[in-house]
């Protein structure tokens, strides 16, 4: 497993429409392992293959919801000790995903993106959808999704079509988000 570089806007590769996965082999499994390691390292909950430079229709999601039954854990980040609630990991892999039946009712959720770091915006999306995908063995699945899982899969599937969440914003707000990203890079 390896942590891969996450492409950041305005990298033109993020605008590529990804191709279907045709080979379900060890290379695909290695890429998935790398994507999870990369996503966890960046404290993300979803990652599309194109975000690590692979233009194929593959994404991984782990909402990492807090485990209310677990004892709080102490940890140290940047030299500061603190206590946090452990999370339940539920890593999910979606190969060649498709949205079949988005709901007409919409929800507004504040979204962020590992490819647009430190930028957040309210985005309106269908609050439920039916999704069809394949697993790492090529077996097909379908599931009705709602809540954060529905939002996350729609966000990640946008990546597969060359769309960033900021593309859903007005031209003015998108420009402000890109300027904020540019300033953050210059300050680093």
Image (cartoon, grey):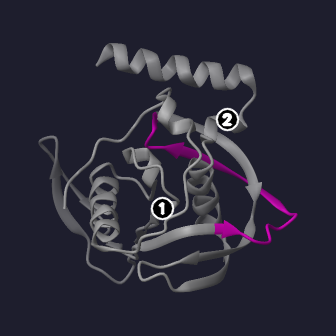
| Tag 2 residue | 167
Of the numbered discs 2 and 1, the one sitting upstream in the chain is: 1
| Outermost residue toward the right in this view | 104
Relative height, residue 155 to residue 74 (above, below): above
| Residue 143, horizontal then vertical, whole percent | 65, 82
| Residue visible at 31% across and 61% down in the picture | 31
Answer with left or right where residue 5 lies relative to residue 17: left
Q: Residue at x 48, y 62 (%)?
A: 58
Using the numbered discs, state the Cα–Cα distance from disc 2 to disc 1 in whole angstroms.
19 Å
Q: Badge 1, how many Cα within 10 Å: few under 14, some, many 20+?
A: many
* Image location (x, y in percent) of residue 72: 26, 71
Camera-near label (2 vs 1) is 1
- Secondary structure under badge 2? helix
Q: Which numbered dot is residue 34?
A: none
Question: Residue 65 appears in which quarter of the rendering?
Answer: bottom left
Q: Which residue is mark 1?
A: 59
Per the rendered image, the range of residues in magenta is 98-117
Quadrant (top left, top right, bottom left, bottom right) of the C terminus = top left
Of residues 66 and 165, the one nearer the viewer is 165
Q: Residue furthest front?
A: 22
Residue 15 magenta: no
- Give yes or no for residue 109 being in the magenta stretch: yes
């Amino acid at each position: 497993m390896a942590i891969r570089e996450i492409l950041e806007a305005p990298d033109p590769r993020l605008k590529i429409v990804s191709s279907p996965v045709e080979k379900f082999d060890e290379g695909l499994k290695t890429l998935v392992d790398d994507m999870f390691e990369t996503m966890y390292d960046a404290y993300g909950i979803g990652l599309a293959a194109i975000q690590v430079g692979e233009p194929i229709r593959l994404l991984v999601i782990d909402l990492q919801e807090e485990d209310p039954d677990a004892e709080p854990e102490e940890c140290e980040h940047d030299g500061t000790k603190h206590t946090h609630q452990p999370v339940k990991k539920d890593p999910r892999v979606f190969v060649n995903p498709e949205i079949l039946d988005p709901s007409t009712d919409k929800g507004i959720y504040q979204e962020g993106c590992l490819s647009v770091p430190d930028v957040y915006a309210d985005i309106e999306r269908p609050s439920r959808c039916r999704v069809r995908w394949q697993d790492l063995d090529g077996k097909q699945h379908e599931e009705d999704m709602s809540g954060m899982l529905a939002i996350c899969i729609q966000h990640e599937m946008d990546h597969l079509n060359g769309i960033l969440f900021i593309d859903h914003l007005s031209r003015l707000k998108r420009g402000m988000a890109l300027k904020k990203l540019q300033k953050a890079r210059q300050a680093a």
